Image (spheres, rainbow, N blue to C red):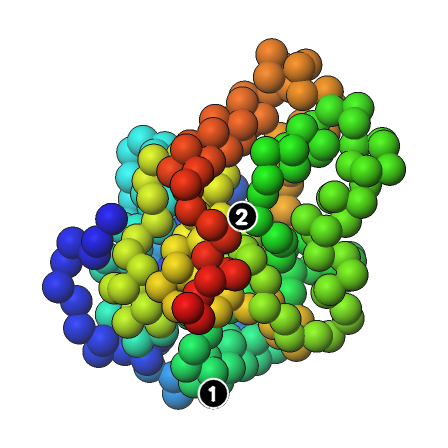
Amino acid sequence: MKIKENTEATKDLSIIVTAYGKPELLELCLRSIKKRVDPRLNYEIIVSSSATDEATYDLIREKFAQEVIFLPHQQNKGFGYVANRGIERARGKFLFIINHDIIIKDDAVQRLIDFLKKNPDVGLVGPRLVNFDGSIQNSAFSFYKWRTILYRRTFLRKTSFARRHLRQFLLVDKIKEGRIVDVDWLMGSALMTRAEAVRKVELFDERFFMYFEDVDWSWRFWQAGYRVVYNQEVTVAHYHGKASSNTSVFKAILFNKYTRIHIDSAIKFFRKHFRENNPRLNWKN
């Protein structure tokens, strides 16, 4: 999907916050931006909200009306939809797309910008995500294979071959403390890119209602000749509530809608890219 609006980069940075409920977390996110982003940086904040409730309207109206471009949406059309609306509205040379449950730490934003400036072949970079207790979240991965979901969602995850495969999926042996590494894909909770790269790669695929938008986007960045990089020298906090189930895949399909959405998105992803080789292996060719 191409960018619909003909936008010009009149800002250094656009921070696009995707929101869905929990206005108390959105407020913490916005306050962390105002506190941690250098005011000398010419930036804008865009909040693109899905299924916007009255509490979120009140928060923006009463506390951030002069500081935020607010894009409320009545229906819940998924992460890709609200992220795309924010990207279309953005005027920044750099785009920082974050969930509303991200808390900016220290000079994280400026360091990500500096990293992209120094590495023009990098199209997408993600910081290390930590829980509020300081523990590290898994947010960089290798590309899915069909058996990945099977191993993660069934009793097979306890087998030695599944544990070995999932260790590779989570890049356990590659991602060492503090290292900057190329990865297949990054979780979409916090991603920085250039508007120029997005014009080439195009927007999130809105056919993915939830899950796999970030996998697909990373795949297309590699296809377009860009690197996708996990930068552990930069850290942000993430209040991550896991929606999908870790129980049996069969029970989860019956009783957990998020697991059903996850599997449905996986099927769409494999159908879309079934005939393509891993683009990361061929991007220099």
Q: CA distance from mark 1 to mark 2?
A: 36 Å
| 253 lies above or below 79 | above
* Vertical order, 220 against 151 (above or below): below
Q: Is residue 182 visible?
A: yes
Classify residue 32 by image quadrant. bottom right
Disc 2 residue type? Glu
Single out the residue that lies furthest toward the front. 285
Judged from the image, the secondary structure of the residue bearing numbered disc 2 is: helix
Residue 256 horizontal/vertical position (percent):
60, 20
Q: Quadrant for the C terminus, please.
A: bottom left
Residue beneath disc 1: 118
The kind of residue tagged 1 is Lys
Say whether disc 1 or disc 2 marks the residue closer to the N-terminus.
2
- Please name the residue shown 17% across and 73% down the image: 8
- In the image, what residue occupies the spot 44% across and 71% down? 284
The spot of residue 74 in percent (x, y) is 29, 34
Asked whether 128 or 10 is in front, the reply is 128
The image quadrant of residue 43 is bottom left
Disc 1 element: helix
Q: Looking at the image, which is closer to me, 246 or 219?
A: 219
Is residue 103 in view from this perspective? no
Q: Residue at x 42, y 46 (%)?
A: 276
Quarter of the image where one finds residue 20: top left
Give the total number of marks visible in the rendering.
Answer: 2
Residue lying at the far left of the rendered structure: 6
**Residue carrying label 2:** 24
Q: Which mark is residue 209?
A: none
Residue found at x 79% / y 24%: 155
Q: Left of 144 or right of it: where is 250?
A: right
206 versus 115 height, above or below: above
Tell me if mark 2 has few (under 14), some (14-19) or many (20+) residues whose alpha carbon lies within 10 angstroms of its own: few
Where does residue 216 sit, x and y in percent of width and height?
A: 43, 48
